[in-house]
Amino acid sequence: MPERTEEITPEVFNHLVELAALALNEKEAEYLRSELNKQLSAVHELEAIELDENIPPASHGVPYPADHKPTLRADVWRPFHQTADITAQAPQFEDGYLIVPEIPHTTLE
Amino acid sequence: MHLCDLSVLELSRMLRAGEVSALEITESCLRRIEVVDGIPGRLDHVESEQDNTRVHAFITVTPDSARKQASEIDLKLAAGEDVGPLAGIPFSVKDVFCVENTPSTAASRILANFTSPYTAATVQRMLAAGAVMVGKVNLDEFTFGSSNESSAFQPSPRNPWNTAHVPGGSSGGSAASVAAGEAHLSLGTDTAGSIRQPAAFCGVVGMKPTYGRVSRYGLIAFGSSLDCPGPVARSAADAALMMNAIAGEDSKDATTARVLVPDYTQSLDRDLRGMRIGLSPDFLQITYPDPDSGDYSQQPVPEEMQRAVMEAAEIYRDLGAEIIENVPMPNTKYGIPAYFVISRVEAASNLHRFDGVKYGYRTKNPVRDLKELYQRSRGEGFGLQPKLRILMGMYVSAAQYSEQYYQRALRVRTLIRHDYDQAFDPNGKYRLNALLTPTTPTTAFPVKDVFGDSVMMQYADQLTVTANHAGTPGISFPSGFDPVGLPIGIQLLGADFSEDLLLQLTHAYEQATADAEWRKRRPPLLEEV
């Protein structure tokens, strides 16, 4: 494999995993790191394009002229008809609270 | 021929003439599901040889509510009440749309236990039009794939034309269910080709509408700037009827466009004279990564794909359209590399909400604190493909890499959009009404052939993805079979909000090829029924 496919080193990978809040086993980690590097080698194809600095980024394709923008809803509170159906989905819900284990605290310096 | 094999138009006529009841139509589809679908997708399935003998399109079949809905339509009909334009027509829903009181899983373990408290706008509109939901169909996990094999719910759907092959994806369950006669219509989504590619693989019609044409409210999001809900059907006319039901502004989705929705059935039979249909060399070659060297090479699309496009061009020419050759779409080859960046950033952002706290899967293992709860719940709940997208999205949008990757990809997106603007500019050099291309680089590949190679799998979408970057509409429709009997799909791409025109052109092609030998073929699986 060309050298650049190792862009995601084990150190970079572990940092990403930490940020992504994912617990991975060894086999998964090996597959994911290898695929990330392969995908990045495809992404590097974009470097072949000469990008004039006047070319703006497009966050979406279709233009939104003012007359295409939908009417916004009136800013009024509309209660959901069955909130119990929502809270019933929570893995742990007691007395109106979502229950989670200890929340870690970090003291900022 | 069973009721479940008839067209929506024909059934609607029969229903209103009192020749058939809505319940009979629904029963016909439920019976077909029973005969051809096999076991539904489920977690922790142990692979067996049987898996390759059935369609497995569904995760959840909803026979009780379907029968209830159909009976209500029959009562209304008997009372002479208005029943809606899709009355009694069975449809399936990709399991990435929320439907109240049904499991809405996104084919992921992390949502396997989630029952939606509300219904997506598009599903609501189908129901309001009288269509009958027969169930929720399988997909790639969170739509991340082009074969359905990444679903946490196995067996994943198979191609009705050859059950050892994939149906495509991510709307594979949608395409398979419509091709197999299990539903007449299906609601899918298209982020890089996820409606058009499986439609091509399964020999049905699939349309990706213009971004903003159809509401995304209630759709479990993947790439929010790319996702488009749309119809899977067996003909342009049926797709037009479905578009009539689902298109239009929605006050719950601020990205829907306030653009008049035409009656899509009205333009189907219009004359093609004066239409300008383009062919682009950039859509007749495909890029492939070499698995050993990592280098990229370009090669022509397979001969049968090329031939299908050229034959269709001839047909359109005979119908009075002008064929414009050599339309440059030079940035087509950058569609997938740009997509690797943009879609991953959006996916990573969208997938952060799944945390084991509010809904969905929570780890059963003991944890020290909230952070470990997140890590374990997400680690156990997500499959490999979502994990891959989250990690990539975090990398390419990180402050130190964003300029190199994310910002660059967004600017390439501008160039891709520019290709479309030039081709369709009514005052420009080409002034196209539509661009005719193959839908896919290959026909349906065998199960397990590509799965696992995330780069190769993504390149299955290389001829469809640029329409998602550009936001423009596209439609795939059947145009014959390859030498081993698998369907070939061809694609028409259009300007913003030109769905009516794409449906018209598709319909014209269907009419012109109505007597072709290949139109008489049926999936071999259906010979048993």
Image (spheres, helix red, strand yellow):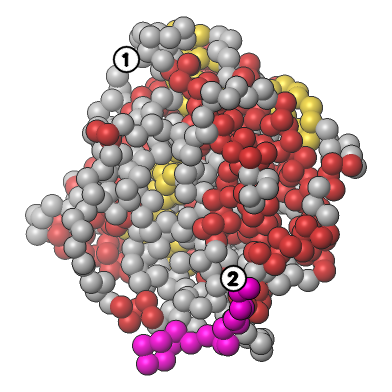
B158 vs B475: above or below: below
Q: Which residue is mark 1?
A: B271
Looking at the rendered structure, the kind of residue marked 1 is Asp
Residue at (41% x, 25% y) in the render = B495
- First-in-chain label (1 vs 2): 2
Q: Residue furthest left?
A: B80
Q: Position of residue B195 (x, y in %)?
A: 50, 43
Main SS type for the magenta part? loop
Which residue is more in the foreground, B285 or B411? Answer: B411
Discs 1/2, front: 2
For mark 2, name the chain. B
Residue at (52% x, 85% y) in the render = A100
Is disc 1 placed on a helix, strand or loop?
Answer: loop
Is disc 2 placed on a helix, strand or loop?
Answer: helix
B217 vs B245: above or below: below
Q: Residue furthest front?
A: A109
B366 vs B349: above or below: below
Span shown in magenta: A93-109
Q: Is residue B507 visible?
A: no
Q: Is residue B127 visible?
A: yes
Residue at (9% x, 59% y) in the render = B79
Marks 1 and 2 sit apart, C-alpha to C-alpha, by 50 Å
Question: Where is residue A106, by image quadrant?
Answer: bottom right
Asked if the magenta segment contains residue B302, the reply would be: no
Relative to residue B432, is residue B240 drawn left or right? left
Looking at the rendered structure, the kind of residue marked 2 is Arg
Q: Which mark is residue B109?
A: 2
Q: Which mark is residue B176?
A: none
Relative to residue A70, is residue B56 drawn left or right? right
For mark 1, name the chain. B
